[in-house]
Image: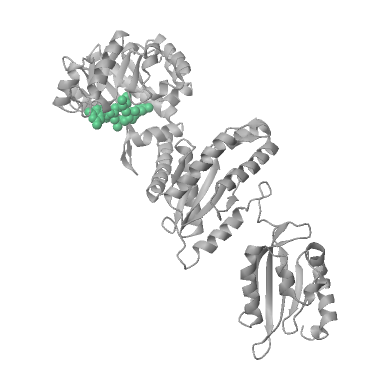
Amino acid sequence: MADIIKDEKFTADVLLNLLSETTDDYLYMWDIQNGTFYISDNAYEDLDISRLIEQDVVTSWSGIMVREDLEPWLKDMQMIQDGIKDYHDMEYRVCNKSGRVIWVSCRGTVKKDGSGRPLFMIGRISNIGKQNKFDNVTGLMNRSQFEQDIKALVGTETAANGVIVVLDIDDFKNVNEKYGYAFGDRALNLLSTLISAMLPKGCRLYRLDGDEFVFLVKDGTRETVRGIYENIQMFIGSHFTVEGHQILISLSAGACFFPDDASTYQKLFRNAENAVEIAKMNGKNQLVFFSEEMYQQKLRNMELRESLHACVKDGFSQFELFYQPQVDAVTGAVTGAEALLRWHSPEHGEVPPSEFIPLLEESRLITQVGAWVLEESARQFQIWSRYKEDFSMSVNVSYIQLKDNALLEYLKDGQWGDLPVGQMVLELTESCWVPNLHFLNQEFEELRGMGYGIAIDDFGTGYSSLSHLKELPANVLKVDRSFVTGIHQGSYEYIFLEYIIKLAHSIGLKVCVEGVETEEEFDIVKQTQPDYIQGYLFGRPVSASGFEKLYL
Ligand code: C2E
Ligand code: CA
Ligand code: CA
C-alpha cells in the first residue's frame, strides 16, 4: 500500500475512484502531515463540496455538516491530528446537494510513523439515511435508531435517568379499514407532527411499528410525563382532522423509568410495552406507569389463563360449586342457595373467583364453564327441590354468555325434565344491563318467557339504573354488600336501602340484601324490610354435601 501511494496524488486519486466503482460509499484518503485530502468523485456528485476540500478538509467539511453534530466531530479530528486517536468512527448529518439532510457513517483508520506521528487516514463514508434510520411514512427516526440512542444513554456510567413513553393509537386499524391505508399513512404523518409539537424541547419522537410511537424524557418525573400525555390527549382529541375527515383518535401510553425500573434497553422497552398493553386492557385512552408488581400480575394472569384452558379441556375436574344460603329476612328460614364457582387448582391453590372469573370472561372460556355451572347447579337443584318444594337456586350468568347466544340455545333445549325452572334464578350484574339494555331485555324476556327467574346482581355498584329499573325484565334485585358494611340508622346506606326497597316493591321486585355479616348489621337492615338476606351471618358458601348437612 505504502508503495502504491508513494506517487501520492496520481495514485491515491485513481485508486479511490477505481475502488468507489464497487460501492455506494465515498472513499477518502487524508494526508495529515501535508494537509491534502482526496475523496472519490461520487462525493462531489452528491454533496455540496468543491475541490477546495483537497486543501482544507476540516473547513470544507464543516460547511456541510449539521451544526449540532459539528463540535464532537471537530474534537475527533483534532485528536487524530494530534496523534491521540488512531481511528475515526462517527455518525452525523450532512447536507446533500439538494439541501436535504442525510445521515452518514464515517469511518477511518490512521497510519502512524515509528515515532507515533499520524501520517494519513484512509476510510469510507456511507450514507445511512438511505438505510434504515428514518421511517419513510412519518420522517421520524425509527425503532433501530431509538434502540441505538437508548443504548448509548443507559449504557453510560454517568448515571443517566429518565423515562421512556410508548404511545399506541387506540383502534387505528379502524381508520385504515374505513379510509384505506394511504389515508392511514397520511393520518399517521400528521399525527406524528402534532405529537412532536407537543413534546418538550429537545425531546425526540420516534416511530416504532404501525401505530406506535415512543419518546424519551431525560430526568422526567411522573408529573412531567402525565402533563405531556394529557396535553397530547387534549390536543389531538380536539384538533384532529385529516383531509376534511374528522377522526376520533385516542392514545394509550405506557411509561418506564430508568434506571429505577430497568437498566437495559431490552428491559426498558419490554416494560413500557407491557404498561401500554395494560393500559389497553384497562379500557384504553390512558397512561400506565410500569411497575414490577403489575408485571408480575400480568405474568400470573398468563399462567392462570393457561391453567384454566387446561382445566376446561380436562372436563372441568378442578371446578366445584359451593352454595351459600339465602334466608327469609323475617323468619330467617333458608329459602334457597346461590351457586358459587370454586377453582381448586393444583398449581395455584385456591384462586378466588374475583381473580379467575374475569380471566374466563376475557378468554371467552366462560361460555363453556358457564354451561357447566348451569348443568351442575341444575342437577343439584333437582335433588334439593325434592327435599324442599319451594327451594330456589340462583346461578350467576356472565354477560359474555348472553352475547355468545349459547346460553339461550342451551336453556331452550330444556333437558332438565321436570325441573321447577321458576325457582331457578339467573343472576346478572347490574353494570351489564345498562350499555346493552335493549339487547339484554330481549334475551331476558325470552328467558322469562321460559319461566326462569331473573335477578339484577350487585345493584348499586353500576350506573345505578334507577330510571329504567321499571323496564328491566327482572324478578329480584340483589343489593350489593357495600351498602351493608358500615350501615347505621340515618346513614346514606340506610336511606339508600330503604328507598330502593320501597321502589322495588312498588314495581313488584323482590329484594335480597347481600353481605350481612353481623347481628348489628342485620338488626338495622331488617328495618328497611328486604325480602331475603344472604350473608356470612347466615352461612358462608359451602360444598354441596356441607350445604345438605347444614340446611336441608
Ligand atoms: P356475587 O355474585 O356477588 O356473589 C356473592 C359473593 O359475595 C360471593 O363471593 C360470596 O362468597 C360473597 N359473600 C356473601 N356473603 C358475604 C358476606 O357476608 N361478607 C362478605 N365479605 N362476602 C360475602 P365469591 O364466591 O368470592 O364470588 C365472587 C363473585 O364471582 C360473585 O359475586 C360473582 O360475581 C362471581 N362468580 C362466582 N361464581 C360464578 C359463576 O359461576 N359464574 C359467574 N359468571 N360468576 C361467578
Ligand atoms: Ca351473584
Ligand atoms: Ca352480588
Relative to 208, 371 lies left or right? left
Q: Relative to 398, is 189 above or below? A: below
Relative to 180, 21 lies left or right? right
Q: Relative to 207, is 235 above or below? A: above
The quarter in which the C terminus is drawn is: top left
Give the residue displayed 62% in from the left and 74% down from the top: 75
The quarter in which the N terminus is drawn is: bottom right
Relative to 523, 251 lies left or right? right
Q: Relative to 452, is 457 above or below? A: below
Residue lying furthest bottom in this view?
A: 115
Q: Nearer the viewer, residue 54 or 119?
A: 54
Q: Position of residue 475 (x, y in %)?
A: 33, 13
Give the residue displayed 56% in from the left and 60% down from the top: 149
Give the residue displayed 42% in from the left and 15% down from the top: 444
- The colouring scheme, among rainbow, by chain, secondary structure or one colour, is one colour
Q: Nearer the viewer, residue 447 or 126?
A: 126
Q: Position of residue 395 (x, y in %)?
A: 33, 22
Q: How many marks?
A: 0
Q: Nearer the viewer, residue 336 or 455?
A: 455
Is residue 497 visible in the rendered image? The answer is yes
Q: Quadrant of ligand 3?
A: top left
Relative to 34, 525 lies left or right? left
Is residue 86 visible in the rendered image? The answer is no
Q: Position of residue 61 (x, y in %)?
A: 72, 69
**What is the quadrant of residue 62 in the picture?**
bottom right
**What is the quadrant of residue 72 in the picture?**
bottom right
Q: Position of residue 393 (x, y in %)?
A: 29, 18
**What is the quadrant of residue 128 in the picture?**
bottom right
